[in-house]
Amino acid sequence: MSVAELKERHIAATATVNSLRERLKQRRQLLLDTDVAAYAKSQGRSAISFSTTDLICCRTLQGHTGKVYSLDWTPERNRIVSASQDGRLIVWNALTSQKTHAIKLQCPWVMTCAFAPNGQSVACGGLDSACSIFNLNSQVDRDGNIPVSRILTGHKGYVYSCQYVPDQETRLITSSGDQTCVLWDVTTGQRISVFGGEFPSGHTADVLSVSINSSNSNMFVSGSCDMTARLWDTRIASRAVGTYHGHQGDVNTVKFFPDGQRFGTGSDDSTCRLYDMRTGHQLQVYSQQHEGDDNDVPIVTSIAFSISGRLLFAGYSSGDCYVWDTLMAEVVLNLGTFQNSHEARISCLGLSSDGSALCTGSWDKNLKIWAFGGHRKVI
């Protein structure tokens, strides 16, 4: 059989597969006749009742002199690392509000930070297109700064997001403006796998966020300016496992649901969405009606789920932080209306590992820790 004949057969087979995929997608859409909230209401379920004393601001972390862009908790829940426009990483004791480390960065334009699973190292990335690793136990130099222990280079665009693989201090995933995600060996500084790029199933624009599945650390999801989220298997770098559509703007943030079978997204289109990883279905849209010009609609910057998944915390460019009931798709609380709320865009947020506290970071240069109060238990 000649090469030309093989090419023809390959083209025909590809067309057949694509046709079958489209038919399957249409069939699934026909069967998807409801969403989570509609079904829950049909079963007589109601939204969680929340009052302003059930989630209270117990601490404000002050020390940055520029906008806060990113934060992360340690697994033992008592420390937070934050990255700011002031070109510093600060490690905080979340129980006392004290700073334990203040790291001056070589590149002040830092956009992301993350704690290693053992809490002994932090990673950060930004407009220098690199991810820098700092060992918090290292001796400080003559200027009092912690030296860089490793620099991960290879991206051809800014590094927008980084996350350590759970329980693996030597593995880290980054996302970048070069339209790729990379799995790194932190010990050697080498790239293990590149996801996207020249592969046709990869993102077609900047990749803004990643979230690793804590139930199966081989799986991670990414969100991009191409308005999609994509699911990846670290063992198969050549193609995305799934592509999830629905948003009408950049997907700024992604986060796995606690059970590892679903994930949430937040977008410039002012909505959060919940997707089923196995079926590819969009299960629910979380959106508020906004008055005025469409250009003034607040964007979703960051999301996090409560430990049970019943609550979705979403930060917005307006300074609001909605607490959504994921089952009923209703806002049960808005931290942005509290007297001691942030005074500018909420740029990042994260939940402690035991689910007992929420930390929010803002362009007002501060971080705030919110704790469940009164009779309310962790949800």
Image (tube, rainbow, N blue to C red):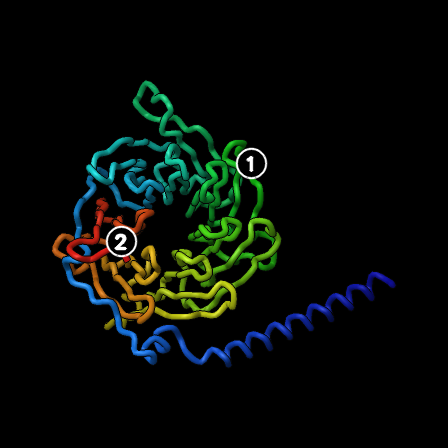
Q: In this figure, which residue is indicated by the disc labeled 1?
A: 190
**Which residue reaches farthest top?**
142
Residue 194 pos. (x, y %): 57, 47
Q: Is residue 303 visible?
A: no
Q: Which residue is mark 2?
A: 346
Instruction: Classify 361 as above or below 99.
Output: below
Q: Residue furthest right?
A: 1
- Is label 1 in a helix, a strand or a loop? strand
Residue 43 appears in the figure: yes
- The amino acid pointed to by label 1 is Gln
* Dot 2 amino acid type: Ile
- Taking the image as shown, residue 156 lies to the left or right of residue 16, namely left
**Which picture quadrant has residue 81?**
top left
Query: Image quarter for residue 12?
Result: bottom right
Mark earlier in primary sequence (2, 1): 1
Spot occupied by residue 21 in the image (x, y as percentages of width and height): 61, 72
Q: Residue at x 44, y 28 (%)?
A: 149
Disc 1 crowd rating (10 Å Cα; few below 14, some 14-19, many 20+) is some
Relative to 353, 239 lies left or right: right
Q: Position of residue 91 (x, y in %)?
A: 29, 36
- The C terminus sits in image quarter: bottom left
> Which of these two is toward me, 72 or 64?
72
Q: Residue at x 54, y 55 (%)?
A: 232
Residue at 29 percent of width and 36 percent of height: 90
Q: Position of residue 77 (x, y in %)?
A: 30, 42
